[in-house]
Image (cartoon, rainbow, N blue to C red):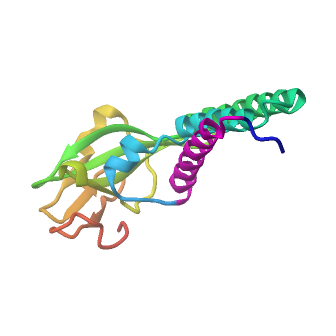
Amino acid sequence: MILPRRPVPALAYLSVAFVLGATVAVTLLVDTELVLLNDTLFHPTLFGIVAILTGGLGVRELVRPVAWARAATVTAMVVALLVWLRIGLVWSIFSSTEIGFVDGPGPLSVRVIEQWGMFESTATLSVRTDEGLFSREWPLECPGFDMDEGELHLVRWVGADRVEVHLPDEEPFGVDLDPATGRPVDACR
């Protein structure tokens, strides 16, 4: 392979693409409790698009003297972008959205999250600690249930270490929490 006269920009592009691609892989494979990472820094669709673009530019710089290789690189980059955008669209359709939250004792709060399935949505719960950059969030292992934004009063704190959901025509269920950290101690019961 004939290297261009200035391989530094190509290597810089490829390095950035590698770092962003690794970030996407970590995002998809690792589940973390840190809210900063989950809500702010983990945008795999955006990082994937930038990784594909910079990787394609880096390879294009490396094969600049060969016209057919340059055209093949651009074609592969466009196809990869379209596939990744399709994946991102499906991902955004099935991603969860926050319905609301119920403040608890101290820095704790319960988030009511709407999870979309194939044909319907269900509400799930998570506990979040408000500690600035080091805020953490834990899902509560409760069965999914139907809840609207106006029904947040059905989620109640029972002391500093228990969250309960009081649905109409059903037995209340809840989760015991560690009062120091807010981490769930056991599953719903």
When the figure is inspected, residue 96 is found, relative to residue 109, above or below; the finding is above
Q: Position of residue 78 (x, y in %)?
A: 75, 28
When the figure is inspected, residue 78 is found, relative to residue 91, above or below; the finding is above
Q: Main secondary structure of the magenta part?
A: helix
Residue at 36%, 60% (x, y): give it.
140
Quick one: 97 or 134, which is closer to the camera?
134
Q: Is residue 89 left or right of residue 130?
A: right
Q: Position of residue 76 (x, y in %)?
A: 79, 34
Quick one: 137 or 159, which is closer to the camera?
137
Is residue 140 something one can see in this rendering? yes
Magenta-drawn stretch contains 15? yes
Q: Position of residue 187 (x, y in %)?
A: 37, 69
Q: Position of residue 147 (x, y in %)?
A: 38, 40
Q: Which residues are magenta?
A: 5-29
Residue 75 placement: quadrant: top right
Residue at 69%, 32% (x, y): give it.
81
Q: Is residue 113 left or right of residue 50?
A: left
Quadrant location of the N terminus? top right
When the figure is inspected, residue 164 is found, relative to residue 63, above or below; the finding is below
Residue 11 placement: quadrant: top right
Magenta-drawn stretch contains 24? yes
Q: Is residue 31 left or right of residue 5?
A: left
Quadrant location of the C terminus? bottom left
